[in-house]
Amino acid sequence: MAETVLAARLTGPGRVLRVEETEQGPPAADEVAIDMLYASVNPLDTYVLAGQVAGEAPVPRTLGVEGVGRLGDDLFVVHGHGVGLSRDGTWSRRAVVPSGSLVRVPAGVDPAQAACAAVCGRTAIRVVYELAEVTAEDRVLVLGATGGVGTAATSLALSTGAAVWGQTGDPDKAEAVTGMGAGAVIARSPEELVAAAGGLGANVVLDPLGGNYTSAAAHLLAPYGILVLYGASSAAQSRIDVRSFYRRNLRALGYGGVMEGHDEVRSGIRDALRALAEGSMRIPVGDRVSLSDLPAVLEPGRRRGAIGKTVVDVGLG
């Protein structure tokens, strides 16, 4: 039996996001209908909205690539299997999704943080534990440290006993960095980054910014250091002094979650949820919005002032 639910829908022409009542059919044999509680807002969602990702998928459809919902007495992360990409997503009061897209949330984990585990949390796990392999012996510089992945990665790196610094371009956010237990590096430009962090002796830099920030990160890395790239929010193109890079025996590693298969995704989500349950990772939720707020939240050029993640409280409307 079909139900009418409130959802944030990508509509055409013009790829406009509208919050509207939509009719939702019953789940198929390999699907479940789950009552959504929270859904995360990710850069990937903005790429889908702009048609840069999944641009050929049919419209109208509901967006949102991850979230947390209730099914029976349990909470589940919802992510993968095309959710929010090629099929309806999580920005809805109720979502019909593949059974394989559900991962159970352990007891005691904040549902709003769990709603960010599949993308933000999994990324932090991959870059800190698996690529950089951070230990207590390391000196880690996290660029964009007050963003979603930045806060999660900072907390993970600190949990290893490493010395950690977090970069922010906003002096008003420096206290958020020190509040996590890291040193604050205030740098509004790549040049300021080199000046402020050049003496830290960082042997690991986590870089979601790209552009000239990547050039600066390579410049200030200690010999035998590791540069981990997982975003390009500043710019996609960068210049590196190759001779200096190889002569200092530096390494550059990249992470893109879209390359992972279903089993890898599920494993990464479980690892992120375990880290949240154990307290070794935190994903601060700095902004809670309603479904009706989403079109304004996703306006191009809107400046985010919040620390950590933006989460949709689906029950707010």
Image (cartoon, rainbow, N blue to C red):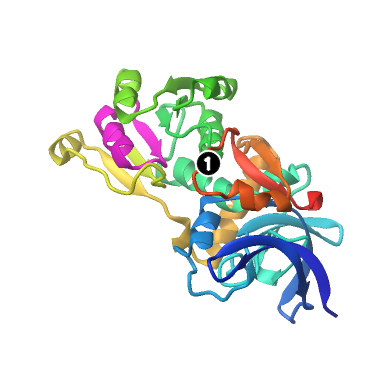
Q: Residues within 10 Å of mark 1 (few under 14, many from 20)?
A: many
**Three-letter code for the amino acid on which mark 1 is drawn:** Val
Q: What's the residue at 31%, 38% (across, down)? A: 214
Is 230 left, or right, of 10 in this rendering?
A: left
Residue 233 % position (x, y): 41, 44
- Residue under pointer 1: 149
Quadrant of the image for the N terminus?
Answer: bottom right
Q: Is residue 129 magenta?
A: no
Residue 250 % position (x, y): 25, 38
In depth, the one of 298 and 27 nearer the eye is 298
In depth, the one of 32 and 260 nearer the eye is 32
Is 227 left, or right, of 298 in this rendering?
A: left
Visible in this render: residue 80?
yes
Helix, strand or loop for disc 1? helix
Q: Is residue 205 magenta?
A: yes
Q: Residue furthest left?
A: 243
Residue 69 % position (x, y): 76, 57
Q: Is residue 267 above or below residue 273?
A: below
Q: Is residue 30 above or below residue 183?
A: below
Visible in this render: residue 222?
no
Q: What's the residue at 57%, 76% (across, down)? A: 58
Residue 178 % position (x, y): 55, 20
Magenta segment range? 201-221
Is 120 left, or right, of 132 in this rendering?
A: right
